[in-house]
Image (spheres, rainbow, N blue to C red):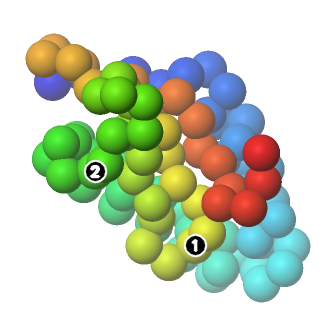
Amino acid sequence: MDVIYHRLIPKDLRAALAYYDAEGGSKLGNRFFRDVEATIAEVTESPRRFHNIEEGLRRRAPLRVFPYHLIFEESAVRIRFLVLRHDKRH
């Protein structure tokens, strides 16, 4: 299955990493990055285990530790990650 990332996801990821690096040092930033990677792996392994947010078109995958989630779309041949978003921000 192909995995595609929206062009703004790296920007969102860099901003969150910069915040956690500034707040808690590189160890905290590394924990955040591993949490993102683990969530992406879970989505690619079993995307339908995450709940729908728009009548079956999009799904929301929360990170395990940090207050962020990934929004993604799934089709028969690909998963497209649309956004990495903080739980309390719009």
Q: Residue furthest right?
A: 22
Q: Residue furthest front?
A: 55
Q: Residues within 10 Å of mark 1 (few under 14, many from 20)?
A: some
Which numbered disc covers residue 41?
none
On screen, 43 above or below 57?
below
* Residue at screen point 57% across, 72% down: 66
Q: Is residue 4 left or right of residue 14?
A: left
Check the image and report above or below for 40 versus 5: below
Residue at image location 49% in from the left, 46% down from the top: 70
> Viewer-proximal residue, 45 or 22?
45
Mark 2 is surrounded, within 10 Å at the Cα level, by few (under 14), some (14 to 19) or many (20 or more) other residues, namely: some
Picture coordinates of residue 77, whole percent (x, y): 16, 15
Along the horizontal axis of the image, is 23 left or right of 53? right
> CB atoms at circles 1 and 2 under 8 Å apart?
no
Q: Which residue matches tag 2?
A: 50
The residue indicated by pointer 1 is: 66
The answer to which image quadrant residue 87 occupies is bottom right
Which is nearer the eye, 47 or 15? Answer: 47
Q: Nearer the viewer, mark 1 or mark 2?
A: 2
The spot of residue 53 in percent (x, y) is: 43, 39
**In this view of the protein, can residue 36 be seen by the observer?**
yes
The amino acid sitting under disc 1 is Phe
Question: In the picture shown, does residue 66 fall above or below 36?
Answer: below
